[in-house]
Amino acid sequence: MKHWLTLGLLMSVAVFSDAEAEAQAYLPKTDDEIVEVLPARGDSWLEIRYLRKQVAAQPNDLEPALALVRRYIELGRAESDPRYFGYAEAALTPWLAVAQPTAEVLTLRATLFQNRHEFPAALDYLHRALARQPRLAQAWLTRAAILEVQGQHAEARNSCIPLLKLAEPLIGQVCLNSILSVSGQLDTAYRQLALAVSTVRSAAPADKQWALTTLAEMAERMGNTDAADGYYRQALQMPRRNGYLLATYADYLLDRNRFQEVVELLANDTRADGLLLRLTFAEKALRLPIVAVHIDALTARFAASRMRGDTSHQGDEARFLLHVLNQPESALALAQANWAVQREPRDARIFLESALAAGKELQPLLTFLSESKLQDVRLQTLLAQIGGSGV
């Protein structure tokens, strides 16, 4: 197993954590205590059982614990199941209590903070990790992902540069070109990443899948919908489940009124809030009776998130309020709060949509879009409606 989380799993937290609720760590009182029985998922479940036995057999050995934590995080991302992050935190906690936690331990702790959108804490742990091990690729990649989400493109780009030497070739290329694509160099980034995907033969499946997903998103922002569809389909054909890919492709289908395809894609994925939200959009458009049940479920889930103080769902809840409940003022308030934390194209989109629906103009957002030189035909359409400058 690689000593860094694969790119597709790591970078996805930058924008898909909206679908993941905060999970609190719990440490069993004895080794025999059953906390919860995980769902059986073939090889993944067998692997978890093996890793847990390794940890139990070697309680003073860090490497088995790190392997278990990494696998929990991978499964949490793939399945959009927040419980795995709680298990990861519980397994990691003892190694944070030692006098000098290793750079790998600090980086994984940062990843768990990143998952909860606690970005300042995550960046602090990454700073400590890189001070101890400046050549740790995982830490640079996590830092780049967080900074990109925050719209700090220059710093994010600088965090990608070391990966060109420290990580597998495709990892560095996706990291760098993803950031270039949202900072005024979309065409160049698209060409460079397409070339990398076609020439790098040794990429891990998850890294290849993420590169294809990133290409699909770039093509979509360029207005090249046929290419986007092709890249999404290639990514979906790879034998790895990816919750972020499912959500992003569902958004693509929704924009093209391909509602039945969304239902077929997500019918069995009602557990993850972000996927249930997209399924509900499609069901509402198709006027399916089940939509009322799913609206009630989402209302309860978002309320529970607010009670926990979990702010990672604000972008999705803003979409729910605007497009399902028709509450533009409330949607705008959440979209604005979400924008204060993360500033990716989808965050800008719900912010603009809510502002239009509420009849408000948001100059700070327009200024950011202009200064960042973000290119996205979907945002261009919205900006034209409010007379803003193009992107």
Image (spheres, rainbow, N blue to C red):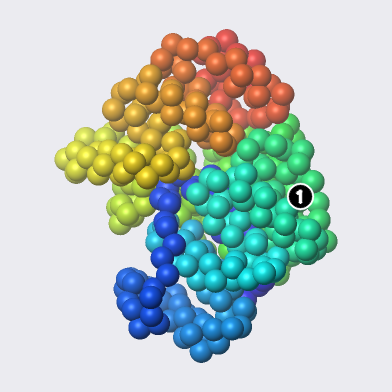
Find residue 187 and report its horizontal and vertical position in percent: 72, 37
357 above or below 277?
Answer: above
Q: Secondary structure at mark 1?
A: helix
262 and 69: which one is in front? 69
Q: Is residue 322 left or right of residue 70?
A: left
288 above or below 45?
Answer: above
The quadrant the N terminus occupies is: bottom right
Quarter of the rendering containing residue 362: top right
Q: Is residue 338 left or right of residue 302?
A: right
Residue 196 in sight in this render: no
210 above or below 35?
Answer: above
Number of numbered markers: 1
300 and 283: which one is in front? 300
x 55%, y 71%: residue: 94
Find residue 26 and report its horizontal and vertical position in percent: 41, 65
Residue 31 in sight in this render: yes
x 60%, y 66%: residue: 96
Quarter of the rendering containing residue 202: bottom right
Q: Is residue 190 left or right of residue 294?
A: right
x 76%, y 41%: residue: 155
100 and 145: which one is in front? 100
For badge 1, the amino acid type reads Ser
Q: Residues within 10 Å of mark 1 (few under 14, many from 20)?
A: many
Quarter of the rendering containing residue 391: top right
Find residue 164 and report its horizontal and vertical position in percent: 80, 57
Check the image and name the residue furthest to the left.
289
Q: Which residue is mark 1?
A: 159
14 above or below 44?
Answer: above
Find residue 29 and report its horizontal and vertical position in percent: 38, 75
x 63%, y 66%: residue: 105
